Image (cartoon, grey):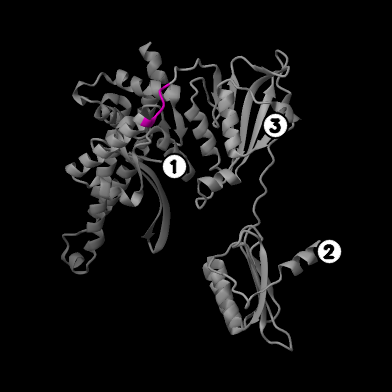
């Protein structure tokens, strides 16, 4: 039995994966060998060699070689230790540190089993991190009731190597517990970090969720300051406990929940349904999840065997929660129970808003079946959620004084600055800037023989409706407004700017 648990243990699998780090250990050791061999080949004791200054690269190679040697030894040691001696692994030590009496911790199999049970039964995965009801599994393990502060880090780091600027994205989550212990885990997908933070807000609602730039300040707080933070946490926790309704008796589990990643669980909760829907609206990919009762529901002579939710979300960091809920496209698909041994054929589809979808999903979870008489009946084999039409890309169109035309979809502010400069010095006679979406544009056209001023046409949606404006002005003023438009600072002032919206609408309707 113990052997079976070990083979299925999430924690044991995580420690065994440390063997992959032997590659890095070998790489560091090889680099150390090469650097130290180069240094040994240099005759540093030779006087002419020292006077010529050629000793500097040799000393530099020695320093780098020793650093690479230390890194190689460390990676090799920790990889072997974690894989073959899990009781001494970083993961085991982080679990012990969360216990009330770490020195009295049980053997490593029981230690890992505590976390495994929670993750396997209740875990929601975000990249390399799993969040259960009580434990969070990453590079370290954290006991959720102990969390006091959470910091998400998503940064682009820049460093210069051999004269070239190298960019790298750092995505990590930092958790500080009541004992001021820090658990940190790296992720690969910034979208997963956002969803992980949202999930933790539900699982640890009384903890502090702060930007990364405050992390070092909190990590450096004194013992007295941290006791104050812990005391404030307990006050928030107590107040929430007093205001929370009395817990209801646990309902009999009669539901299988299929997560967006395709895994199933019968340990379904309201929080799981809510958080999955909330996370789905933050993704620009199609997200599907399903609630299927073990005994089909019957309504109006129709037996419904599952309720699937299809979400086309919005991946835009500038959108707040209300914007995301308004912009997401949500479809509920209620599948009709087929004949025994046959795949489902018929379903009823409803396109709905966020709050309506959440309520129907929760009602379904509690056994309350929606009235599908007003839903659209479809053949489930051929029906797919409508695909979101991609926004029209931005554009920068330029026509030179000699009549040469060029157009760009990939450009930056420096390109718009060059276009503005071209207007000022006469190199460009026409410029048109279109912002993402295709409806916000700024167009500069040359004047005629009777009026040498250029004509500027611009759209604006500041008041919630799209308006068209125009005026005539010198190219220098048009160049200034062009940059303001790109920066989002353009505001047409009346009566200088003439509103021609009605004229444009009439032309479109002809």
**Residue 12: image location, x then y, percent:** 36, 24
Q: Is residue 143 visible?
A: no
Left or right of residue 363: residue 115: left
Residue at image mark 3: 349
Name the element at disc 1.
helix
> Which disc number belongs to residue 436?
none
Quadrant where the C terminus is found in the figure: bottom right
Name the element at disc 2.
loop
Report crowding for label 2: few under 14, some 14 to 19, many 20 or more residues within 10 A (C-alpha): few
Left or right of residue 209: residue 408: right
Distance of label 2 from label 3 (alpha carbons): 38 Å
Sequence-wise first label, 2 or 3:
3
- Residue farthest to the right? 510
- Which mark is in front, 1 or 3? 3
Name the element at disc 3.
strand
> Between residues 21 and 62, which one lies in front from this camera angle?
21
Residue at image mark 2: 510
**Residue 77: image location, x then y, percent:** 27, 34
Dominant SS in magenta: loop
Q: Is residue 244 magenta?
A: yes
- Tell me the residue at 40%/36% (across/down): 200
Report crowding for label 1: few under 14, some 14 to 19, many 20 or more residues within 10 A (C-alpha): many
């Amino acid at each position: 039995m113990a052997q079976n648990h070990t083979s299925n243990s999430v924690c044991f699998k995580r420690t065994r994966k440390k063997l992959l780090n032997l590659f890095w250990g070998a790489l560091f050791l090889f680099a150390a060998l090469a650097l130290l061999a180069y240094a040994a080949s240099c005759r540093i004791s030779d006087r002419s060699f020292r006077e010529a200054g050629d000793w500097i690269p040799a000393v530099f190679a020695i320093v780098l070689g020793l650093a690479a040697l230390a890194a190689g030894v460390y990676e090799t040691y920790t990889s072997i230790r974690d894989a073959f001696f899990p009781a001494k692994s970083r993961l085991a030590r982080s679990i012990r540190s969360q216990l009330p009496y770490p020195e009295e911790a049980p053997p490593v199999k029981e230690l890992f089993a505590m976390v495994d049970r929670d993750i396997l039964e209740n875990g929601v995965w975000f990249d390399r991190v799993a969040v259960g009801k009580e434990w969070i599994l990453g590079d370290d393990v954290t006991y959720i009731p102990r969390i006091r502060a959470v910091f998400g880090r998503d940064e682009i780091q820049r460093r210069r190597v051999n004269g070239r600027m190298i960019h790298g994205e750092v995505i990590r989550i930092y958790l500080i517990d009541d004992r001021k212990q820090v658990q940190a885990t790296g992720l690969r997908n910034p979208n997963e970090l956002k969803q992980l933070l949202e999930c933790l807000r539900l699982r640890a609602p009384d903890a502090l969720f702060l930007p990364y730039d405050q992390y070092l300040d909190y990590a450096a707080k004194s013992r007295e300051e941290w006791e104050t933070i812990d005391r404030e946490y307990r006050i928030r926790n107590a107040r929430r406990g007093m205001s929370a309704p009395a817990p209801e008796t646990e309902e009999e589990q009669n539901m299988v929940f299929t997560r967006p990643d395709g895994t199933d669980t019968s340990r379904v909760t309201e929080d799981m349904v809510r958080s999955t829907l909330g996370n789905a609206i933050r993704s620009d990919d199609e997200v599907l999840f399903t609630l299927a009762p073990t005994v089909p529901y019957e309504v109006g002579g129709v037996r419904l065997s599952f309720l699937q939710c299809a979400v086309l979300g919005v991946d835009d960091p500038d959108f707040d929660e209300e914007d995301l809920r308004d912009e997401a496209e949500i479809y509920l698909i209620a599948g009709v129970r087929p004949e025994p041994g046959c795949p489902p054929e018929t379903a009823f589809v409803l396109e709905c808003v966020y709050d309506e979808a959440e309520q129907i999903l929760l009602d379904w979870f509690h056994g309350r079946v929606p009235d599908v008489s007003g839903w659209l009946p479809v053949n489930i084999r051929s029906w797919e959620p409508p695909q979101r039409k991609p926004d029209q890309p931005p554009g920068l169109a330029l026509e030179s004084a000699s009549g040469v035309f060029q157009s760009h979809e990939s450009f930056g502010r420096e390109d718009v600055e060059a276009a503005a400069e071209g207007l000022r010095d006469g190199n460009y006679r026409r410029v048109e800037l279109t912002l993402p979406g295709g409806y916000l544009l700024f167009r500069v056209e040359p004047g005629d023989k009777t009026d040498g001023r250029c004509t500027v046409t611009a759209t604006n949606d500041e008041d919630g409706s799209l308006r068209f404006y125009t005026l005539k002005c010198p190219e220098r003023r048009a160049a200034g407004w062009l940059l303001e438009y790109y920066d989002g600072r353009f505001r047409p002032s009346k009566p200088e700017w003439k509103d021609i919206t009605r004229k444009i609408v009439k032309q479109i309707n002809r």
